[in-house]
Image (cartoon, rainbow, N blue to C red):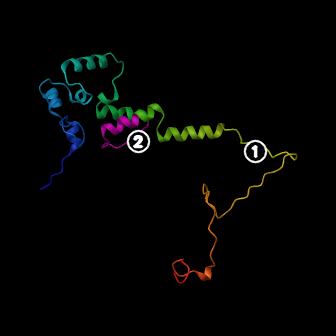
């Protein structure tokens, strides 16, 4: 007997708040008693007044928000923006990819911007050589010291005096 719950399907049907998250009592009342659509309840509209206000605000917009489009409508928008997807792509993923394409944050857009930036870059000039009058500073680094180590290095013991474990023989 399989106990697999198809959370994606339940969410699409409005029967759960999100994948793995059931509706709370207040949210269920808003959906079933007040007949507020699940999408508005997910956004926090738990009263009829809050729903009416959100609905009126949305109604005055010239275009429908992406989250209110059906999967088929989102697929049409994605095709217009040359987004590659399969018919099984979830609504949330389509919305995310469309938003990336609109803001120019998609991988393809970044690649095109980098190409353009690379072509527009001026050649880098090498650093200027010090003048002959100025003495050149030579850096002497002690190999036994680690960066940030201010302690003096321990004197090295003779290798032939060390045992197998790196300790002097006889200890």
| Along the line of sight, the residue nearer the viewer: 146 or 107 | 146
Q: Over which residues does the magenta segment extend?
A: 82-98
Instruction: Tell me the residue at 40%/34% (across/down).
Output: 98
Depicted 167 relative to depicted 12: above or below: below
Secondary structure state at the residue bearing disc 2: loop
Q: Percent position (x, y) of residue 79?
A: 39, 35
- Give the image location of residue 105, x and y in percent: 47, 36
Which of the two labelled residues, at mark 2 and mark 1, occupies the earlier sequence position?
2
Q: Is residue 89 magenta?
A: yes
Question: Label 2 belongs to which residue?
Answer: 84
Q: Residues within 10 Å of mark 1 (few under 14, many from 20)?
A: few
| Residue drawn 19% across the image and 39% down it | 22
Classify residue 156 as left or right of residue 170: right
**Residue at 38% across, 36% down:** 96
* Place of residue 72 in the rendered image (x, y in percent of width and height, measured from the top left): 30, 34
Is 5 positioned to the left or the right of 69 in the image? left
Relative side of 124 to 160, left or right: right
């Amino acid at each position: 007997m399989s106990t697999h719950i198809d959370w994606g399907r339940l969410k699409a049907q409005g029967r759960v708040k999100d994948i793995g998250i059931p509706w709370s009592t207040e949210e269920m009342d808003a959906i079933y008693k007040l007949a507020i659509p699940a999408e508005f309840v997910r956004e926090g509209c738990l009263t009829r007044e809050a729903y009416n206000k959100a609905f009126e605000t949305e109604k005055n917009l010239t275009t429908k928000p992406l989250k209110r489009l059906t999967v088929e409508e989102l697929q049409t928008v994605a095709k217009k923006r040359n987004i590659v997807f399969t018919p099984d792509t979830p609504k949330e993923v389509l919305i995310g990819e469309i938003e990336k394409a609109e803001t120019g944050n998609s991988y393809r857009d970044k690649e095109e911007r980098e190409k353009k930036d690379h072509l527009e870059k001026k050649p880098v000039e090498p650093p200027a050589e010090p003048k002959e009058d100025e003495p050149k500073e030579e850096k002497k680094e002690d190999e036994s010291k680690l960066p940030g180590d201010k302690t003096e290095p321990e004197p090295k013991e003779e290798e032939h005096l060390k045992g197998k474990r790196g300790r002097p023989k006889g200890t």
